[in-house]
Amino acid sequence: MREAGSILENQELHMQNVISLRKKMPVSLMHGETERIRQFIETNGYRKTGPTVTSTFSLEQQGNEQIVDVEMLIPLDRPFTPPEGCVCKPVFQLMNAVSIRHIGNPAALQATCAKLIAYMEQRGLYPITNGYNVTVQEADNPYSTEEMIVDVYIGIRSNIL
């Protein structure tokens, strides 16, 4: 099994029949959107063919509420007509990425990402995408977050100019 903090180069992330929701919303509403997509998948008899992937584009404070601009990507077993607010991406392909494995509480994920960014800076690797968080192992319950595994992928520029 891949170790926590291990960094790999030349990685790829491929998915097909991806339901994508990109939305700017209060963090408090994320669970409801996740549940809405889960119900869409279940009600229509689709099957997930891989882990859920998320990418955060921005996080800001509005009053006492955090607003997140996030994309959620879930690969399904066949093509579909997306529900309101979602799109179908027939193919999602991230090439030439670096990745790092985070094991444990997602509250510490930012420190893992900082390690990956420092690695990229040390090697002159230039990011061209946001980080894509691939949930390899979800928490079974709110008390088992220490068992979570998330791989973070960042696409890098392949040209040296």
Image (cartoon, rainbow, N blue to C red):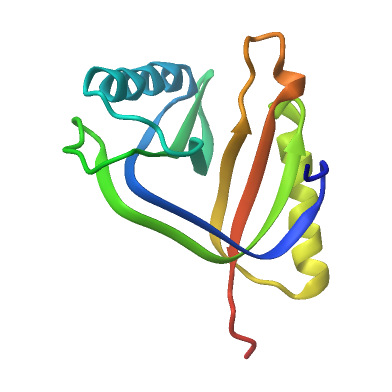
Relative image position of residue 120 (x, y in whole percent): 75, 65
Q: Nearer the viewer, residue 37 or 58?
A: 37
For image coordinates 61% across by 53% down, the residue present is 153
Q: Quadrant of residue 72?
A: top left
What is the quadrant of the C terminus in the image? bottom right
Relative image position of residue 81 (x, y in whole percent): 16, 38
What is the quadrant of the N terminus in the image? top right
Residue 89 falls left or right of residue 83: right
Please identify the residue farthest to the bottom as the structure is shown.
Answer: 161
Residue 46 falls left or right of residue 103: left
Disc tally is 0
For image coordinates 24% across by 17% down, the residue present is 43
Residue 42 falls left or right of residue 64: left
Residue 157, above or below 68: below
Q: Quadrant of residue 156?
A: bottom right
Relative image position of residue 5 (x, y in whole percent): 82, 46
Residue 79, above or below 61: below
For image coordinates 78% across by 45% down, the residue present is 2
